[in-house]
Amino acid sequence: MSYQLPENSEKSSYVQQKFNEIASKYDLFNDLITFGMHRYWKRFVVRQTGVSPDGMCLDLCCGTGDIAHRLLRAVPQGRVCALDFSQGMLHVAKQRGMATGESPVFLQGDAIRLPIPSERIDAVTIGYGLRNVTDLSACLAEILRVLKPGGVLVSLDVGKVRLPVLAEISRYYFFYVVPRLGKLLYPGQDMFDYLPHSSINYPNQESLKRIMLSAGFKQVDVFDFLFGSSTVHVAYKP
């Protein structure tokens, strides 16, 4: 039977449950499917924030805390909040903080209803998370609300490969190889089918740029990796 994405009304609870289930081996999964390159991309995300050492940062959909812990090193006199709705992911992220002796402030919550006052944040980061929100426009509106004037959003997510031959190779890898690698770690886990299928209706690079501009950002820069299979959008609040 072919995989069917959950209905939008069920998406939030489905994704939350599935990320809880795969949290303990999620970092290993990312290393396997990107050959470790996601680590470089996340360092790039942090550099693109341009945040000052005393800045206030928010890492949305923080997962196991990869980006959040990198942000800590960028703001030694500042503060990092990391939010996710998966308790399993937050548990792994907190353990990482215990191992290093430093930790962000972790919050469990929804990216479209942020428990943060308006205009408090210098930089918002989000790694492979926009694709999972139930309302993209509402999420972008919330990010704009909490950002200070002149603040920046840096989003890392899947993109669309433009060259036809490379697009076919990328599609085969994402839809056939990636789920099989995931199921070696968690046999029978359909979250690894969700991940590629969730990219089908997700906006391509230029469409997402237009959506961000329409949401109220004044400028959006786009950076592609691996021919566009992963992409970073850097959006600035007026």
Image: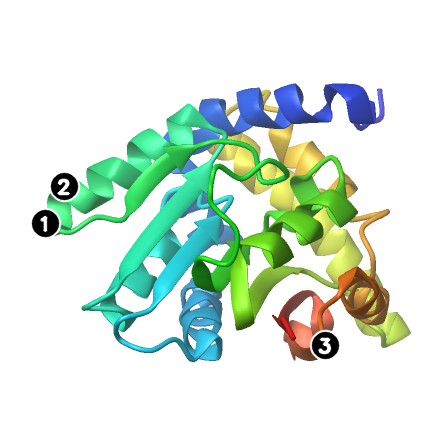
- Relative to 71, 113 lies left or right: right
Circle 2 residue: 98
Mark closer to the observer (1, 3): 3
Dots 1, 3 in contact, CB < 8 A: no
Q: Residue furthest right?
A: 164
Three-letter amino acid code at the position of disc 1: Gly
Residue visible at 24% across and 68% down in the picture: 73
Q: Residues within 10 Å of mark 3 (few under 14, many from 20)?
A: few
Mark found first going from the N terminus, 3 or 2: 2
Observer-nearest residue: 97 or 160? 97
Mark number for residue 218?
3
Dots 1, 2 in contact, CB < 8 A: yes
Three-letter amino acid code at the position of disc 3: Lys
- Relative to 99, 212 lies left or right: right
Q: Residue furthest left?
A: 101
- Relative to 184, 6 lies left or right: right
